[in-house]
Every structure is written in structure tokens, then in C-alpha cells.
Amino acid sequence: MMAGTDPQKQLLTLIRDFATEKSQGERRIVGLKKRIQELRSELDLANAELEDTKRLKETAEQDLKGYEVELARNEASIQTLEVRISLIQDEILIAGSDLEALKTSEFEEKIASLGEELQRRCICPSCHVDNAQALNEILQASDRN
């Protein structure tokens, strides 16, 4: 009987070992399927984040191009305004010179007019003697004495 039980025992052990291995294999398969599912979810998430990041990058690049265009326009505008300011400053200098020349001319005209008036007033209306000349002669005579 011993000999009969021994192969039975071996068969039962083999069946148990097979069942245990099968069970472990099934658990490993279930575990691997679960891990694959988790990795697919992570992959989907990573792909979604990648797409979002690509869109953000594209938007940032478009914004940058817009800012570069705006910067170029502003630089051109600054150059135009600098030229305009320079021209206005030149015009101001010319106008200032013209104003000074005009003031000088008006001043010279006033002085000439006053000179003529003084000469006219120095001549005596009744005897037509040049009083300035007569005064000068008197002053020279007094200096000699």
C-alpha cells in the first residue's frame, strides 16, 4: 500500500504544485494587465500634457513674433520721432536767429530814428543854429581855460 500511496501522493503534490503555479501565474497575469492599464493611463496623461505643452509653446512663439513685430514698429517710430525732433530743433534755431536779427534791425531803426530826432532838436527853429555844435565849442573853450 505504501507504494500505491506514494505515487498518489506525488500526483497530488504535482496537482497542488500545478494549481499553485497556475494560480500564481494567473495572479501575475492579472498584476501585469493591471500594470499595463496603469501605464496606458500614464501614457495618455503624458500625451495630453505633451499636446498642451506644444500648444502653449506655439502660442508663446506666436506671441513672441507679435512682440518682435511690435518692437520693430516701435523702433521705427522712435527713429522717425528722433528725426522729426531734430528737424523741429533746427527750425527753432533758425526762428531764434531770425528773431534776433529782426530785434537787432528794429533796434537799429529805433536808434537811427532817435538820432535823427536828436539832430532835429539840436537845431534852433528860429535861428537855425546847431546847438550841439555850439555847446561843443563852449565845452572845448572851457577845457582850454
Image (cartoon, rainbow, N blue to C red):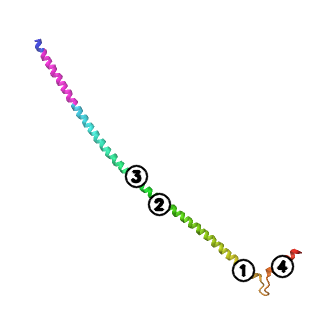
User: Considering the numbered disc 2 on the image, is that residue within a helix, a strand or a loop?
Assistant: helix
**Membership of 30 in magenta stretch:** no
Q: Which mark is residue 77?
A: 2
Is 145 in front, or is 22?
145
The x, y position of residue 34, in whole percent, is: 24, 34
- For marks 1 and 3 on the same chain, the one whose residue lies earlier in the sequence: 3
In the displayed structure, 135 sits above or below 51; it is below
Q: Residue 138 is drawn in which quadrant?
A: bottom right
- Quadrant assignment for the C terminus: bottom right
- The amino acid type of the residue labelled 1 equals Glu
Relative height, residue 110 to residue 11 (above, below): below
In the picture of the structure, the residue carrying the numbered disc 3 is: 64
Main SS of residues in magenta: helix
Image coordinates of residue 22 in percent, x first then y, are 18, 27
**Residue placed under numbered mark 4 in the picture:** 137
Q: CA distance from mark 2 to mark 1?
A: 58 Å
Question: Is 127 displayed left or right of 65 in the figure?
Answer: right
Question: Label 1, on which residue?
Answer: 116
Magenta part of the protein: which range?
Answer: 6-28
Other-residue count near label 1 (Cα within 10 Å), few / some / many at <14 / 14–19 / ≥20: few
